[in-house]
Amino acid sequence: MPQALAFIAPSIFAAGGSAALITATGGLTLLGVGVSVGSALLLSAAQTALFSQAVPETRPANIKITTKQPTAPRIRVYGQARLGGVVTFFRSRSGRYYRVVAHCEGPVQEIVAYYLDKKRVYLDGNSLVTDAQYTLDGQRLIYIYDRVGNDPSSNYDAIETRWSSYDSSHRLDGICTTLVAAKSVGPEDFNRVYPNREPDIEIVVKGTKTRHPGTGTRAYSDNAAYVISDFIERSDGFGLQGYVDVAAFSQAANDFEQNVSIGGGNSEDRGRIWGAYSLMDSPRNTLRRMTSASGASVRLLPSGKLGIFSPKSRAPSVTITMADILEVVEWTTGPNALARYNEVPYVFTEPAKGYQETTGRYVSNSRVADEGQVITGPELDLTMCPSAHQARRVARRQMEIDNPEALLTLRLKPSGLPAMYEEFVSVDLAGFPSYKWRVTGFDLDPSTLSLTLSLASYGQPDETPDPEDDVLDIPDISPPQTVPSPTNASAQGAGIRASNNSFAAGVSISWDDRPEPSLYPRVIYAPTGTTAFQEVTLTDRATLAQITGLNEGAGYDIVLTYRTRDDQVSDPIVFTNVIATADGTPPAPPTNLSAEGVMATEAMIGFVRVTFTTSTSDSLYRTRLFRDGVQVAETSANPSTPVVFQDETGPGTFTYTARSINVSNIQSDTDAGPITVTVT
């Protein structure tokens, strides 16, 4: 057993170390998974995709992503999480496309919600999406089937009946998946039904069933003690089944299940864990995320097993007396002013905001008053915390840990050895304040069994909100409101100048500035009559989109929407058959138009000598000359070029005008002239 424990915390079994294997202290460095997707793969490729070695970052925003790349790491969910996934099959037949997405390790308890293109959708008893957007002429267009990831699982009959080679050998055992089967629609309905092409699917799952370390039974639980114990014992965690102390676990589970006040007569469980982690991540990092989110700690016990402890206040079970002390090595008044803080920002996951990362802060007014200013500490990463109030409790506790009033170092006799297994101890020493002391580290002398113990004072914070002593900045978590659509939107042909006399065809779309900072625009476009939409890269504050590199004179369909960070989407503004032009601005007309009649002689007929200067516009393509409204000449001379034209008219009176044409065949708003001349 010591060998196994040394694997997790080798420093404990050396001359010095910390008795806490994992505690809820310090910011976290997260490695994890952004669940990405790859398209046009076989069903069996899901196994390869989930077992990749790539390790992108595990964040609530990333695990909702569904993109098209071939591989992504395996992930597991505890509590609840909103997930995108890895596309493992994408084919079409008979006017319907079929896409299988692998979301996470199974089995999960259940799938509790479905999202298509960031919008919550609901299914009828036949697995058809009931949303009006996906209904045409009374017919529901999209099926969603799912598998929770049992092993063995059942294959998707909707695929096997159409592709017979994809039989029960492609069941995706042990992987939570969905199958979206969407029916095609005509070009006239496509923008309304599928404004973002084939809709991406996300799901909300109740995740992995946790194991009771005493009975071995499995059931869904988001209780922090159950989650942490399961992760310690699970083979893709620390793999230490049988090492969790059942008595300590049971006490912690009861503590985390107890209700604590959140104000207004409401309460919630003391500690829950919701979130996903990568199976490729370091177990130490994942365990730190869990303990940080819940305030739990994991410590080595004298039995050699691991104890899980809640942040609930309890009197220390070990008291150090004068009889145990060899020497008071050091006593200080805690960190200096530069190391203290009285405000702590944090990031947690807010289910009511689409499971997005949400920021909050905790401020201690009493500490601000003592220190004369607001001092901000390091941001806490609580992304496995599903509650603003739980995040506040954890942040307040962390502030107490990081800002002790006193630090004490004692050298103890062997009788003091039990103290190294404790998180908190008492010190009964004349003249010393009666603090509750937190054990921060130790150094064991193996030759004498003397123990040097490092302690920090700890004032157990009240778990209920205290408006007199602290500020809790909780973001708005009211129910989602309807997202407004962009206003005063317009689209027209407009290209760009590629070089001195070269222009690329395009279209431009403009709209009013967003009414609130939480909105950001999205523009997609496709050739009219097709569904090959592409997205335009925009800044969050954009009010103009310029699309270039299009085919001159071709029509394009354009869809403009607003989106929010919590994945809500406005009704689309749709423009159809917008004609791409290289330059939509009319060119300036020619200038200096003049005409001189030359009298006929025996050698030649009468004619008119016409002169003009071509347009100053860089987009000039042609200049046309008209006599009495009929075109008689055309030139492609460059801008600002003098032109002379001899028009053999014979005798008579004639009227001339000149007109500019740009590269997009747009004429000048006005003509040069008219000029009237008589030939005799």
Image (tube, rainbow, N blue to C red):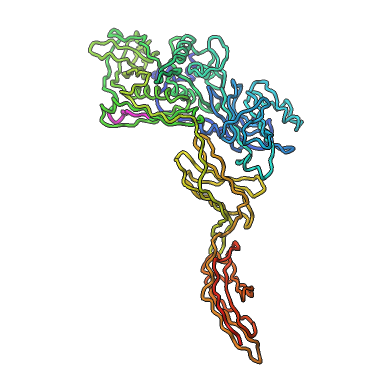
Query: Magenta segment: does it hold 340?
Result: yes
Per the rendered image, the range of residues in magenta is 337-344
616 versus 652 height, above or below: above
Quarter of the image where the C terminus is located = bottom right
Which residue is painted at 32% across and 19% down in the image?
456
- Residue 620, picture quadrant: bottom right
Q: Nearer the viewer, residue 533 or 439?
A: 533
Residue 67: percent from left, percent from top: 59, 37
Above/below status of 107 relative to 325: below
Name which residue lies at 67% across and 48% down: 529
Give the x, y percent position of residue 49.
62, 32
Please indicate whether residue 414 sits to the left or right of residue 566 in the image: left
Q: Is residue 330 magenta?
A: no
Residue 192 higher or lower than 309, as above or below: below
Query: In the current view of this chain or complex, which residue is farthest to the bottom?
Result: 602
Residue 118 image point, x, y percent:
56, 34
